[in-house]
Amino acid sequence: MSVAKKDQICALLKSIETGDPGPVAVVNEARYVQHNPQTHEGSEGLAALFERLSKTSPRVNIVRVFEDGDFVFAHTEYDFARRNIGFEVFRFEDGQAVEHWDNIQHRADLNQSGRGMVDGPTGVEDHELTELNRELVRSYIENVLLRGDLDSVETYVGAETYAEHNPRMGDGLALLRGALGATHNGHRIIDYQRIHRVLAEGNFVLSVSEGYFYGEHSSFYDLFRVSNGKVVEHWDTTERIAPRSEWKNNNGKF
């Protein structure tokens, strides 16, 4: 029986903790394209890298994992030298992972609504609604986050049920509108400029976007849970994109 792609990626990520070289076989290292600008490409095999990392006593917690065609995307919690929250995206081709993207943010304390960055539901439901949920989120990103149409927020987001896990925000539409409309030095603090990818499985949708946060070039990864045609829960990470002069590979963040 073939092993699901999401299970292979879970084993791969856990091998950072264990140093087990077996799960690395899911990666076609000859064709592997790394999109983390801070990671050298091809300088060290993944098995050797993970074995080295395992000696630092890392902890890897895979909170959620999803599969969308050739893509697997995971919501993760890492404890290396510091505690981080991340999203990992892998693309498969011919049965192996050949491309990887990620977005990492330092783990923060509970937000004003008492929610952490990874807590909440993890199980996938409503598989038959995957494409409808994907298009709902894409439209929300395009109209509200890119174009700034805050009056249409309630079209996409559940007014009575919205749960927010961003550590700088809190539950409810009023706080959401306030955060999205906030400015600094005449510019939007949260400034989405381009959407790169929307991945989905059932009631969970991950969007990958680019823009500026407090004027710094940043990547936005947003995970949404959808219920009854509305976004009802949101998790995210925001990461500063280093200037090109600091990149360790030339593949680009996106």
Image (cartoon, grey):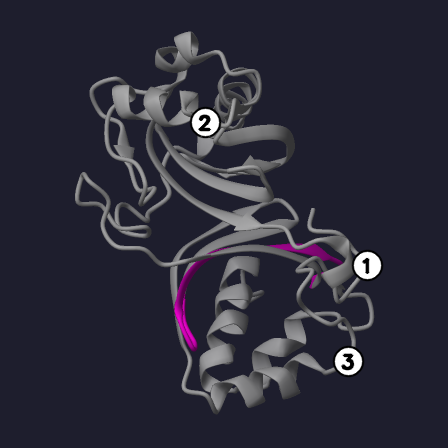
Check contact, mark 2 vs mark 3: CB within 8 A: no
User: For mark 1, does the 10 Å Cα neighbourhood hold few (<14), some (14 to 19), or many (20 or more) residues?
Assistant: some
- Which residue shows up at 49% across the image and 64% down it? 7
**Mark earlier in primary sequence (1, 3):** 3
Q: For mark 2, what is the residue?
A: 129
Check contact, mark 1 vs mark 3: CB within 8 A: no
- Which residue shows up at 28% across the image and 20% down it? 173
- Which residue shows up at 41% across the image and 35% down it? 224
User: For mark 3, does the 10 Å Cα neighbourhood hold few (<14), some (14 to 19), or many (20 or more) residues?
Assistant: few
Residue 64 falls in which quadrant of the image? bottom left
Q: Is residue 64 above or below residue 192?
A: below
Left or right: 164 in relation to 142? left
Magenta-highlighted stretch: main secondary structure? strand
Residue in the foreground of this view, choosing between 211 and 154: 211
Q: Is residue 148 above or below residue 137?
A: above
Identify the image quadrant of the N terminus. bottom right
Where residue 104 sits: x, y (%)?
50, 57
Left or right: 43 in relation to 186? right
Closer to us: mark 1 or mark 2?
Answer: 1
**Amino acid carrying mark 2 in the image:** Leu
Is disc 1 placed on a helix, strand or loop?
loop
**Amino acid carrying mark 3 in the image:** Ser
- Give the magenta part as a residue range: 78-96
**92 drawn magenta:** yes
Q: Which mark is residue 43?
A: 3
Is disc 2 placed on a helix, strand or loop?
helix
Q: For mark 1, what is the residue?
A: 250
Residue 142 falls in which quadrant of the image? top right
